[in-house]
Amino acid sequence: MLDHSLVLKADELFLVGEIETDGSGESGKGLYLRDTRHLSQFSVELCGHKLNLLSARAHDARSATAVLANPWMPEVDGAPLPKHIVMVREHIGLGDRLCVAYEVRNFGLRTLRLPLTMEFAADFRDIFDIRGFATADRGIVRPPVVGEQTFTLGYDGRDGHGVETTFTMNQPVTLSGRMTAVDLPDGTSIEIGAVMAGFELELAPGEAWRLTVDIGPIPAGGTPMRHVQRDTRCSTVHTNHVVLNAIHHQATLDLMALETPFGNGTLPAAGIPWFVAPFGRDSLIVGLQTLHLHPEAAVQTLQFLAAHQGTKVDHYSDEEPGKILHEFRYGEMARLGEVPHVPYYGTVDATPLFAWLAAETCLWTCDDALYQSIDPHVRRAVEWVEQYGDVDGDGLVDYSTVTTGAGTISHKIWKDSWDSLHYPDGRPGIGLITPVEVQGYVYAGYRKWAKTAALHGDPDWATELEAKADGVQSEVERRFWLEAESCYAQALGPNKEPIGAVSSNSAQVLMTGLPSPERAKRMARRFLEPDMLTGWGLRTLSESMTSFNPMSYHNGSIWPHDNSLAAAGAYTYGQNELGERIVEGLLEAAAVDPILRLPELYCGFRRDDAVNDAPVPYPVSCNPQAWASGALPLIIRAIAGLEADPVNGRLLVKPNLPDWLDRIEFRNLRVLGQQGSLLIERLRGNVDGYHVSSQRLMFESI
């Protein structure tokens, strides 16, 4: 049942098929809850033979159907059985439990006696262990407890918490349990519980047999499964471009599926399968990308992260007063402190992103109660930026590449792989690093929260923040600008020298509003060059750099979320050509996907319709992934030119529609306490321009 590539998710529970992990290279297939694998094997055989998988298709985030059939069998009831005579259909549903409904049908011309066997096992391993992070030891896997049509697999963790998986079948069955050894890629072996279920089928021609297998995980501590309270008020987008509509619709479905309840709040999980967890940076960027679609989701993200804002100095978890978390985990290794993710604060960009999203959300909603509740947390975030984020006191945020143990990160920014930063000659960037895009986030947080504070009656705080923003802008323009390359350096090194890599980090700064108009114009022209823009999107690193590799994670690959920030920034500065080229590349990349989904990333090969007529997938990317799903919504908002004007209580609309798009309609749009629809239509003929109309929204077309 797990021999497919399906990915399903329902609230906290998720199921993945045969997929390779990003670290250890072993199979990550299974049923997971709170970072623990509750089902690691679920195999089905007919007459001792594995079945041929004909198709496996997800209907939505929670359900799928797989169709299998028998291979050629040399002897069934005294005669050979040709392949594809017996169909086995699996309907897979995910909710509080995993439910698999089977239909076995004989399409042959003779009655068949068919022994059907199923084998189940659960290793209850932590997701960090599966991904290749070393664990000191493991707890005790219990022997299976077998009943008549039920059985239970269980595990007693080293932290004293037990977990279980229960199985129930609605047909008479022969069950036998045993302990079995499993060899791991690191050379070790573990004992896990396994159960064999046997059925004796006798099917006349055309006859079908049915079975339901119900699988229920019981997490550590027995805390009941949590559920997302669905908000049906999410805005929708409709255009005259059929493919654009379909891709945007899939993105919104994926974002809904990724919404996850995490104990004291709901926010989008970063991605399936490896990052079904709270991620500060990812969730905050998704909030920026989708604020116009679902402002309540941004509010929930801010509230969750504010509740876990750092209060003390802890070098192991990287916690500091005012800092916003990077990642929160709930498995055994986290509970035992073998990884520092309870939570882990090892990033320097989440804190300024928190201030930026808080400001954008308050400006969009004009909610005074939200401002009053979140302002103390923004003040603490600003204090962190100045007291802890600025290691050497030069007014810019830095980080050290020194790591503190398993699961910790050397590059504490969105490009967090160990080899994501190099000088143009290929030397690695190590030591104290000052990343350019983070300074942009700081600038945007200062500038936008100053506007917010002024709106809510705190002019002194606003003036202070404006001065801080001016200081950051001046330092970035002076220290990072690469005149010969017409863009900013990716970072500054330990001696504050520019690490002059031409990268998408510089392009992200456009969305923050930091560059001068003249430099923004030069940057837009630079990123239109083919060493950066491939036809499928903007690369993370220029092809001209020594460390460029289109198959790498961060040194030449293409990330849709990264592209969305660059495109949105380009439109803000009126550099529409760059915005249009990026969105066209992303649309065409998504259009070749079977379900029109943008993946987390893909390889950065240059587009050539004769050879590279589709993006080359990156092998272990999350699918779906939250900020990839948020990419197109952000770009559409930028194309429409939507900006809240809370001072005058109206929505500003400055359309930038590309030639292939004539119409955008936002339905159920909620902004500044208003709710209604907005329609933007291109005027063609004697008078060029746009017609903008609305129901129940105050707006101004500019």
Image (cartoon, rainbow, N blue to C red):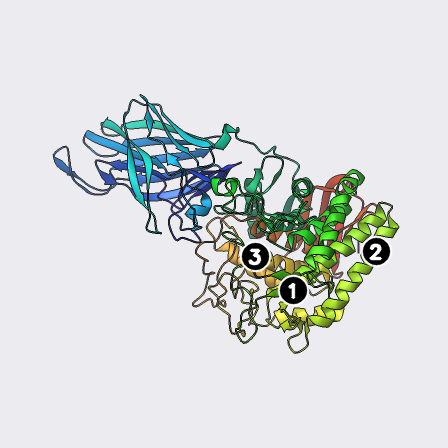
Q: Amino acid at mark 1?
A: Thr
- Reading the image, the residue beneath label 3 is 560
Q: Nearer the viewer, residue 123 or 624?
A: 123
Q: Where 697 sits versus 524, above or below?
A: above
Q: Residue furthest bottom?
A: 484
Residue 464's disc number: 2
Disc 3 and disc 1: Cα gap in Å?
Answer: 24 Å
Disc 2 and disc 1: Cα gap in Å?
Answer: 23 Å
Say which of marks 2 and 3 sits in front.
Answer: 2
* Residue 419 x, y percent position in the rendering: 51, 64
* Residue 679 x, y percent position in the rendering: 71, 47
Q: Secondary structure at mark 3?
A: helix
Q: Where 372 sits versus 429, above or below?
A: above
Between discs 3 and 1, the one toward the N terminus? 1
Q: Secondary structure at mark 1?
A: strand
Bin the neighbour count of mark 2 within 10 Å (Cα to Cα): few under 14, some 14-19, many 20 and up: few
Q: CB under 8 Å between callouts 2 and 3? A: no
Q: Amino acid at mark 2?
A: Glu
* Residue 140 x, y percent position in the rendering: 38, 35
